[in-house]
Image: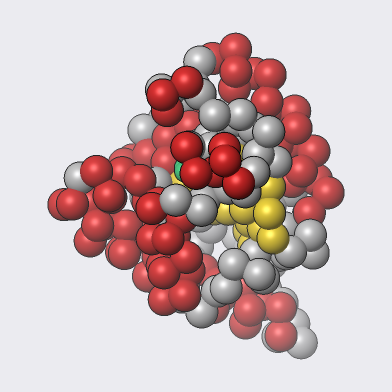
Amino acid sequence: MVFGTGNPHASVMFVGEAPGFYEDKQGIPFVGAAGKLLTDLLGSVGLSRSEIYIANVIKCRPPNNRDPLPDEVETCQPFLIQQIQLINPRLVCSLGNFATQTLLGKKVGITKVRGRAFRLPEFVLFPLLHPAAALHQGNLRGSLEEDFKKLKQVLDTMNEECFSPFPSEPSSTPDQRSVPEPSPQPIQMNLF
Ligand code: URA
């Protein structure tokens, strides 16, 4: 089982899909090629792995890295939810389709929602492309880097709010550019 790794007091948490070969061997998420890319991209926005927390939706490696099955997602989801509740991050970055759909509770393609911030009841969700997708399709590398540039803006805004003597209340008005009719009503923050 590959549970999670990182700072248990992290304010930023990343959620991937499922462990692969190297993660399964070491019992640690994101230690293979996708993990190396993730570590580099984190560094580009001033985050180190030791200050964030990383977990996956699925806690065991699917045979031959196949896509997780619906009943596997259903089985593992309560553990992910409890992990998020325990870590209690302000920002959760979902990597790829499975993590994003699991946390948004909506079957929406990652390309539609990537690089946007959604205010959920307990945290802000920020979906990004999965680093493995950028490794398999070289043309997505630039898009993933774009996502991380937007993530940097979100982090800077969060830090400003944190240090402001009068932190601004996030608008409750959904931004018209956001994804329509989402459920369970994630609201696009007025960050962009
Ligand atoms: N991809 C994931 O989604 N998770 C890992 O831990 C490694 C690769």
- Residue at 42% in and 28% down: 65
- Residue at 74% in and 36% down: 81
Res 72 → quadrant = top right
Q: Nearer the viewer, residue 43 or 129?
A: 43
**Is residue 126 visible from the viewing direction of this image?**
no
Res 109 → quadrant = top left
Q: Position of residue 15 (x, y in %)?
A: 57, 46
- Residue at 57% in and 73% down: 48
**Is residue 177 visible from the viewing direction of this image?**
yes
- Residue at 61% in and 29% down: 60
Q: Position of residue 168 (x, y in %)?
A: 67, 73
**Location of the N terminus (image quadrant):** top right
Drawn side of residue 159 relative to residue 182, left or right:
right
Drawn side of residue 11 relative to residue 140, left or right:
right
Q: Position of residue 2 (x, y in %)?
A: 65, 39
Residue furthest to the top in view is: 71
